[in-house]
Image (spheres, grey):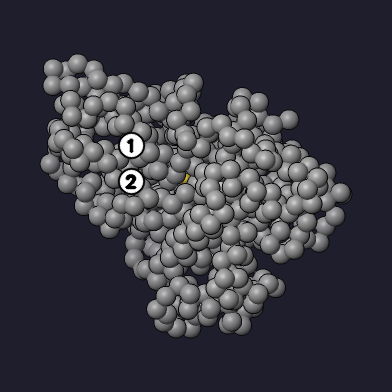
């Protein structure tokens, strides 16, 4: 039995894969989007003062996860999809040092960081751990607006009793799917692969040409993120002094070769001889690259969250560069079609976790982030490598099963340790799960994907609050750190 508390949602694949800014979908992208939504609801011109209150996990790990930066960028009217990444730090510092902000680039009002952005470390709103209260006042101190928003994971934003996500508006899909059993039924009845069914459903929102174009844009952001992360050295921001490792690993694995663009780099990796241990090292290299970029507030694809953004691109790179089908994807058009198929299946599987459990670490710990991304990647890789619908669902189930109970305890409240390496582990489990499923008869499986999604939800409810993105347990309190505020 799946989670009953939610009405059936109609989620597009683009709700699960979003172009945004690191380091956190729930603590950066969600609050940013919430501020932008809020600014649409009252007169900015009449506003003289604002107060932003952060509660629960947003207060406890918000500074490390860039929530304050996201809030300020949102107040400035910047969009996470298009903002100039290189200017984020500068814009944030300008607001803090000037003690004023140009609200939505329309009106400049006083904004004192230490007074008007309030972290309620010991309070939590009942609806969800990631709660926010936004207040606006006019020049006589009268309240113009007071709204609560919740960042419910994966960049989704909600208000109590009201869905504020365009994603959840009612649409009629030709093949409505809320669980893996729905999916099996539709595929059997129509002789569909998972990809066929997703493609048919997705055209409820966009025409085929636009879906194709938008997925290629997502792949392009992933590819650039992988490439940039593999060619950037240095120390990650936040004060933990974590050294970036992807660039050194990339240089070592590619024998110091220099490349001028991501496509030449991928071509080299695909054609170079690779032992088992070298493939394992490349997997870590790809995952580190994406998540080092994510930790640096760079542009990433939320898939389905930012902390877990490295798993899906890493498994796609495995598929394109090391799987038995790698040479079939060598031609640009073939690579694009292969990636489109992969992304559609992965995103569809992700919707089952969003609907039936959670993709929020503040609700379910890291099993809901890395575990879900691993399951999404495992199912997609299986169908892309020729597996049946049932084998793909089996792979997703296996990947999730072996992440159950995984806690979220980021050191210093930063999305760095254990997060970066955890993406490498999630990717490896996805590849292993796909390979197990491809050699198995799903009829013999004892646990279905729906069973494991329900187990994820039950485990999330049982999990101690200190392991839900609060940095109050686990590694976060057992490793002494001296994080300098930045
Ligand atoms: S431990 Fe996992 S869930 Fe928590 S911040 Fe890191 S990647 Fe996200």
Q: From where the camera sits, is residue 365 visible? A: no
Viewer-proximal residue among 184 and 236: 184
Name the residue that disc number 1 marks.
Answer: 36
Left or right side of 269 for 449: right
Residue 80: image x %, image y %? 36, 47
Above or below 436: residue 277? below
Q: Around disc 1, counting alpha carbons within 10 Å, would you say few (fewer than 14), some (14 to 19), or many (20 or more)?
A: many
- Whichever of labels 1 and 2 marks the residue nearer the N terminus, that label is 1
Residue found 34% across the figure and 52% down from its top: 82
Nearest the camera: 14 or 253? 14
Q: CA distance from mark 1 to mark 2?
A: 8 Å
Vertical order, 309 against 171 (above or below): below
**Label 2 residue SS:** loop
Left/right of residue 416 with respect to residue 237 in the rendered view? right
Expressed as whole percent of the image width and height from the top left, the position of residue 59 reads 37, 33
Q: Nearer the viewer, residue 89 or 385?
A: 385
> Which percent across, then down, holds residue 278?
59, 75
- The residue tagged 2 is 79
In x, y percent, where is residue 37? 36, 33
């Amino acid at each position: 039995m799946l989670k009953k508390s939610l009405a059936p949602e109609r989620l597009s694949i683009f709700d699960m894969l979003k172009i945004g800014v690191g380091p956190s979908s729930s603590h950066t992208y969600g609050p940013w989007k919430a501020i932008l939504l809020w600014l649409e609801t009252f007169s900015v011109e009449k506003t003289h003062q604002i107060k932003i209150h952060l509660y629960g996990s947003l207060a406890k790990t918000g500074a490390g996860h860039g929530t304050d930066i996201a809030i300020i960028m949102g107040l400035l009217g910047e969009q996470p999809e298009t903002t100039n990444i290189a200017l984020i730090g500068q814009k944030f510092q300008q607001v803090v040092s000037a003690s004023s902000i140009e609200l939505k680039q329309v009106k400049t009002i006083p904004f004192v960081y230490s007074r008007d952005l309030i972290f309620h470390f010991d309070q939590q709103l009942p609806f969800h751990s990631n709660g926010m209260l936004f207040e606006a006042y006019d020049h006589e101190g009268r309240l113009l607006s007071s709204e609560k928003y919740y960042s419910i994971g994966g960049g989704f934003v909600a208000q109590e009793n009201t869905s504020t996500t365009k994603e959840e508006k009612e649409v009629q899909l030709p093949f409505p799917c809320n669980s893996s059993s729905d999916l099996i039924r539709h595929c059997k009845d129509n002789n569909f692969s998972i990809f066929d069914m997703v493609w048919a459903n997705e055209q409820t929102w966009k025409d085929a040409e636009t879906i194709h174009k938008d997925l290629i844009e997502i792949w392009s952001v992933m590819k650039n993120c992988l490439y940039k992360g593999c060619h950037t050295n240095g120390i990650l921001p936040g004060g933990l002094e974590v050294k970036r490792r992807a660039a050194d690993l990339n240089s070592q694995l590619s024998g110091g070769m220099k490349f001028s663009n991501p496509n030449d780099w991928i071509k080299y990796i695909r054609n170079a001889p690779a032992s088992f241990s070298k493939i394992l090292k490349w997997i870590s290299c790809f995952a580190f690259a994406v998540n080092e970029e994510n930790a640096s507030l760079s542009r990433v694809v939320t898939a389905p969250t930012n902390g877990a953004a490295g798993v899906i691109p890493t498994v796609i790179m495995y598929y394109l560069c090391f799987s038995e089908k790698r040479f079939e994807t060598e031609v640009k058009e073939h690579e694009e079609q292969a990636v489109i198929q992969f992304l559609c299946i992965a995103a569809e599987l992700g919707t089952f976790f969003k609907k039936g459990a959670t993709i929020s670490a503040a609700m379910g710990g890291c099993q809901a982030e890395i575990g879900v991304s691993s399951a999404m990647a495992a199912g997609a890789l299986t169908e892309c490598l020729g597996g049946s619908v049932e084998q793909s669902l089996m792979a997703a189930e296996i990947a999730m099963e072996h992440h159950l109970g995984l806690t979220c305890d980021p050191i210093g409240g930063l999305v760095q340790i254990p997060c970066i390496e955890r993406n490498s582990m999630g990717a490896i489990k996805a590849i292993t799960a796909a390979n197990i499923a491809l050699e198995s008869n799903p009829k013999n499986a004892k646990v279905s994907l729906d069973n494991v999604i329900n187990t994820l939800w039950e485990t999330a409810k049982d999990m101690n609050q200190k392991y839900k993105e609060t940095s109050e347990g686990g590694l976060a309190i057992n490793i002494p750190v001296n994080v300098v505020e930045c």
